Image: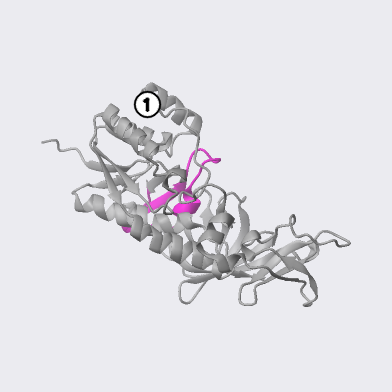
Amino acid sequence: MSSSPTVVIAMSGGVDSSVAAALLKEQGYNVVGMMLRLWSEPGKESENACCTLDAMNLARFVADRLGIPFHTLDAGDAFYARVVQETFINGYAQGMTPNPCLACNRHIRFGLLLQKARALGADYLASGHYVRLRRAPDGSIQLLRGVDSGKDQSYVLHVLTQEQLRHTLFPIGEYPKSEVRTLARRFNLPVADRPDSQDLCFLSGGDYRDFLRRNAPRLGAPGPILDRRGERLGTHTGLVDYTIGQRKGLGIAWSEPLYVLDKDPEHNTLIVGTRRELGARDLWAASVNWIGAPPEGPFRAQVKIRSTARDAWGTVTPLPDGRVHVRFDAPLRDITPGQAAVFYDGEICLGGGIITKSE
C-alpha cells in the first residue's frame, strides 16, 4: 500500500478543480474525487449553475481520465438549511445583502465535506480556489492571496480556522488562470475552455430577485421610498430589487441623482439620498473569524468590503463578543450589511466578519 498522503479533491466539473486534481496526482498524492450534490429548487434542477447532470458527468470523466476514484456526497438538506434559508433568505428578510459563498465554505465545503474526507481516512481536502497557504514562524498556517489578483478568493475563505487549514490544500493558488487553462490542455482534460461560473450555484435561471420572489414572496412587496427626513418620494417595487449605493431603477424624478442609502425591512421602506449623503467612514462587523492569533488591540489593515472591491486602508478595533469596528481613512460608498469586511496585511488574509451596520 502506498505511504503517500491521501487527498479528497472537491470536484465540480470545472477547469479549476479538474486541474487541481491533476496536479495532486502528478505530485504523488493518493487522490480521491468527490462532488457535492447541493440543493436545487424542485422542478428546476437542470437550470442550476452547478451540480447539473452535465457537470457531474464531466467531473466523473475527468476522474476516469486521471485514474482516480470518484464519489458524490449528498449535502442538499444541510446546504438548504445553512446557506439558502438561514443565510440567503433570512439575510434579505433582515435588510441585508448576504454572500452565501461564505456560509457554504464555512459549513458545507470546509465543514461537512472536510469532515467526510477525514472520516474516510484522508489527510487533506483540496479545492480549486485561488489562494495559497504558508506556515508562519510560530507554526500557524497563513492564508495568502492567490497569485492571480483578478481571481484571488481569499475574501470568501476568510472563514477558515487553523484546524481546517492544517488539513486543506489549494494546488492552483500559485498559478494565473491563463496558465491553469494551459495545464488543462497539457493534462488532456476536456474542461480547458469551459467558462467560469458567475452565478450563485443554487439559482435556477433568472437572477436572485426572481429566486427570492418565488421562495419568499413577502420580500417582493412594494413599499414607500423615503429620504432621511422621512419625506415620501415614491414607491419601491420590493426591497429585494435594491442594494446600498444603487442609483438606477429608483423611478424618481429629482433635481439631482438619488442613491439607495439604507433599507428598513421592519417598515418595508427604502431610504434614498444624494451623493453627498452616500458613503461612510465607519462600519461594525460581527461573527469575526481570526485566521491566526486574535489581535490584542487596534491595528492598521487593508480592508475589502466586497469580493470585487479594492482594498481600503483603515484602523480595525476588536470589540467584545466577536465584533470589530473599522474606521476608514476615507469614506466608502458601498458598505453593505450582510457582506464581509475582510482584513489584510499585504498578501496575508488576517480574517474578517459580517458587516452589521455603517455610519
Left or right: 312, with 293 as reference point: right
Task: Report x, y in % for residue 56.
Answer: 35, 39
Asked whether 212 or 279 is in front, the reply is 212
Residue drawn at 15 percent across, 38 percent down: 3
**Residue farthest to the right, as pictured:** 255
Task: Report x, y in % for residue 94.
Answer: 56, 71
Asked whether 237 or 111 is in front, the reply is 237
Magenta-span inclusion, residue 225: no
Give the secondary structure at mark 1: loop
Residue drawn at 86 percent across, 60 percent down: 256
Q: Does residue 39 appear anywhere in the picture?
A: yes
Which image quarter: residue 221?
Answer: bottom right
Task: Report x, y in % for residue 320.
Answer: 48, 77
Asked whether 107 or 350 is in front, the reply is 107
Task: Report x, y in % for residue 238.
Answer: 65, 64
Q: Quadrant of the N terminus?
A: top left
Q: How is the image coloured?
A: one colour
Q: Quadrant of the C terminus?
A: bottom right
Specify the segment rendered in magenta: 135-163
Q: Residues within 10 Å of mark 1 (few under 14, many from 20)?
A: many
User: Which residue, given by chain and number where applicable, does mark 1 sit on?
Assistant: 189
Tell me if residue 13 comes above or below residue 288 in the rendering.
Answer: above
How many callouts does the rendering have?
Answer: 1
Residue drawn at 26 percent across, 55 percent down: 115
Left or right: 166, with 16 as reference point: left
Tell me if residue 302 comes above or below residue 12 in the rendering.
Answer: below
Magenta-span inclusion, residue 152: yes
**Residue farthest to the front, as pictured:** 43
Left or right: 150, with 170 as reference point: right
Q: Amino acid at mark 1?
A: Leu
